[in-house]
Image (cartoon, rainbow, N blue to C red):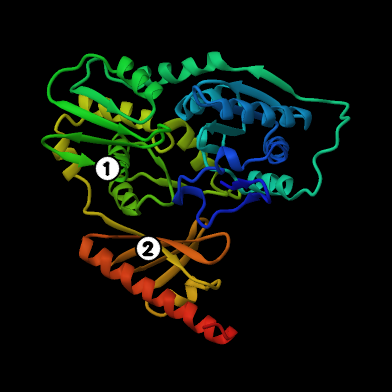
Amino acid sequence: MQWLTEETGWILPEESGPWTDAGLGCGDRISPAALLRLGTGLAGAASRCMIGTAPDSDFARAAALTAAGAAAAAGAGVILVPDCVPAELRTASAAGECGAVLYADETGLRLYAGGLLPLTKRQSEALEQAAAARELPAAGRSEYGTISDGRSLRLLCSRAIIERLPEQLPVRAEFNTASERLRLMMTRLCRGGSGESLTVQLSADGRRASVYTLRSGWIFYEKLLLMLCAAYLRRGEDVALPYWLPRTAERMAAESGRRILRYASLSDGSDADARALAARQGFTLDGTVLAADFLRILAEEEPDLNRWAASLPPCFTVRRILRTERSLDAAAGCGTFLHTEQTPEGLRASDARGEALLHPSRSGRSVSMLVEAASMEAATELAGDIAAALAGSAGRMNAEFGIN
């Protein structure tokens, strides 16, 4: 994801990909010229694009129409889906065979690959190339693309959720979210049910979900993903997960004789199988699918929520953003006391206490750190040791370059 500003077009944020939910700037900072470049970049990222807009947002509609016109002028086929939530674009973009997705709301713009997967490296480069262009695209093309109305595709989202829900809900499900459209849709689809009350908390864009009951307390997003992963593995299925989800999943898969396929942000294409599987399974990309799958498994396979949660291996995580004034070599900083290996999403470092994934920012001036261990004490200790090692590495580089 990139930020858009009136002065400079796209600016890469300090942390990108799965590490933040930052979008593309806010409405009063996006110029018409930047939107035209964005549309041209979309056409370079995919020959068929989908652009969705949030309900009741004049900015979103104007931004979407401007970007759609530029994408069509650059030769792309564009499908406009007005008054929707991102969850609806996941199924809609798959049905429309769209390789890139843009979503506009009052807070800004967000870019995805088709199915709401992370952008690939090639797509990101196409967007960056368009953003860096000194002049707007020349007019006078002999072949233009198309703009079509895709509002009917919104219905596919409800159908996909219904297909995943059990015939009889095992709980009385309630939904909380900042998106009124999303809340009404999920409440309508999940009417009925009996037994204890269960609250599903959805993020405003519908991408993440957590659940709460009086007996279990809060089960937050990351643990909920691992619970779904365990259920899929027990059924004898492989599972596709993003790199940032804890490696505990690999240990669970080994016990089941199955595989975890990992997909990355800014993929180079080597994770095509993982991306295809993630698009089919859906629960790592869409909180509404996660909630529907959770309710189905709770009804048909794991009626005791506390037992289901307790069946996971112990896994505690610590996340930190480490800042530095100079680019640093994380491998050099951690290699003195940890085993390290490179992954498509950054450096993985481990010892007997646990392991960490270190994701460098585009600027090289910060590192996102995810540490996991079998206890919170071990995770906290390992995170502190890594932070100290990286700070020492940065200090040595600062001294070398004469920086105080």
Q: Which residue is mark 1?
A: 220
- Proximity of marks 1 and 2: CB atoms separated by less than 8 Å: no
Please state which amino acid type lies under the numbered disc 2: Ala
* Helix, strand or loop under label 2: strand
For label 2, count other residues whose C-alpha is less than 10 Å away and answer few (under 14), some (14-19) or many (20+): many
Whether residue 196 is situated above or below residue 10 in the rendered picture: above
Q: Quadrant of residue 381?
A: bottom left
Q: State the residue in front, 6 or 167.
A: 6
Left or right of residue 122, residue 250 in this image: left
Which one is in front, 346 or 2?
Answer: 2
Residue 367 horizontal/vertical position (percent): 47, 64
C-alpha separation, residue under disc 1 versus residue under disc 2: 20 Å
- The residue at the point 73 percent across, 50 percent down is 132
Q: Amino acid at mark 1?
A: Phe
Q: Kindly state the secondary structure of the residue where label 1 is placed.
A: loop
**Residue at point 18% right, 23% down?**
171
Q: How many dots with numbers?
A: 2
Q: Nearer the viewer, residue 151 or 263?
A: 151
Mark 1 is surrounded, within 10 Å at the Cα level, by few (under 14), some (14 to 19) or many (20 or more) other residues, namely some
Residue 352 appears in the picture as rendered: no
Q: Residue at x 70, y 45 (%)?
A: 126
Residue at mark 2:
356
